[in-house]
Amino acid sequence: MPGTIPQAIAQQGGAPPAKLDVVLRVNGTEHALTLDSRTTLLDALREHLNLTGSKKGCGLGQCGACTVLVDGKRVKSCLSLAALVEGREITTIEGLARGDELHPLQAAFIERDAFQCGYCTSGQIMAGIACISEGHAGSPEEIREWMSGNLCRCGAYDHIVAAIQDAAETSSQPRG
């Protein structure tokens, strides 16, 4: 009969989702968590570890506000299951500074006024660090291409590109 629920589905009765014990290494510290098997890395960071620098934007991996580094590579944390990054090194915006010394890209964002509302800033910085380490900061055009997965609704792109260029130049010099 059209519109009825198949009997097999009706009998499932909504079993609770499976829980997993996961150890996430975030910003150099291991955290033992018990998570729903469907928990994204973004939700684990924000809701279980209270690391709210990575933002929930689109939830579809299109805006880049949730970008973090996993083993040094940029990852959209809203698309990654937390259980699948167990044992890997996760770096968030909260893990960049060394005490009171900002990461060179964080300092460049301030110097170049590369943020307005600030919502995308953490994702932009994390993706920018990856862009530099991947060797894709040779020109403004190259930076724009490799940063195209991170959106800024305020339109601060010129300042973001300039900040990445500044940090790329700084990172090619010994850090003292």
Image: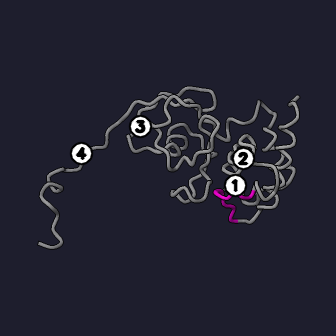
29 relative position to 140: left or right? left
Q: In the image, what residue occupies the spot 40% across and 30% down?
A: 21
Question: On the image, which quarter does residue 158 sit in?
Answer: bottom right
User: Do the residues under discs 1 and 2 have CB atoms within 8 angstroms?
Assistant: yes
| Callout 1 secondary element | loop
Residue at left offset 65%, top offset 36%: 72
Question: For the residue labelled by badge 2, is the local secondary structure a helix, a strand or a loop?
Answer: helix
Q: Secondary structure at mark 4?
A: loop
CA neighbours of label 4 inside 10 A, class few (<14), some (14 to 19), many (20+): few
Q: Which badge, 1 or 3, is on the more N-terminal residue?
A: 3
Amino acid type for the residue under numbered disc 3: Leu
Most foreground residue, 60 or 97: 60
Q: Are marks 3 and 4 in contact (CB under 8 Å)?
A: no
User: Mark 2 and mark 3: span between their CA atoms?
Assistant: 31 Å
Q: Quadrant of residue 104?
A: top right
Q: Quadrant of residue 172?
A: top right
Q: Where does label 3 land, which residue?
A: 35
Whether the magenta-drawn stretch holds residue 133 is answered as no
Q: Which mark is residue 131?
A: 2
Q: What secondary structure is the stretch in magenta mostly built from?
A: loop
> Looking at numbered disc 1 in the image, what kind of residue is underneath it?
Met
Name the residue that disc number 1 marks: 147
- Mark 2 surroundings within 10 Å by alpha-carbon count, few (fewer than 14), some (14 through 19), many (20 or more): many
Examine the structure image and report whether residue 148 is included in the region drawn in magenta.
yes
Q: Residue furthest bottom?
A: 2
- Report how far apart the C-alphas of labels 1 and 2 lie in the structure: 7 Å
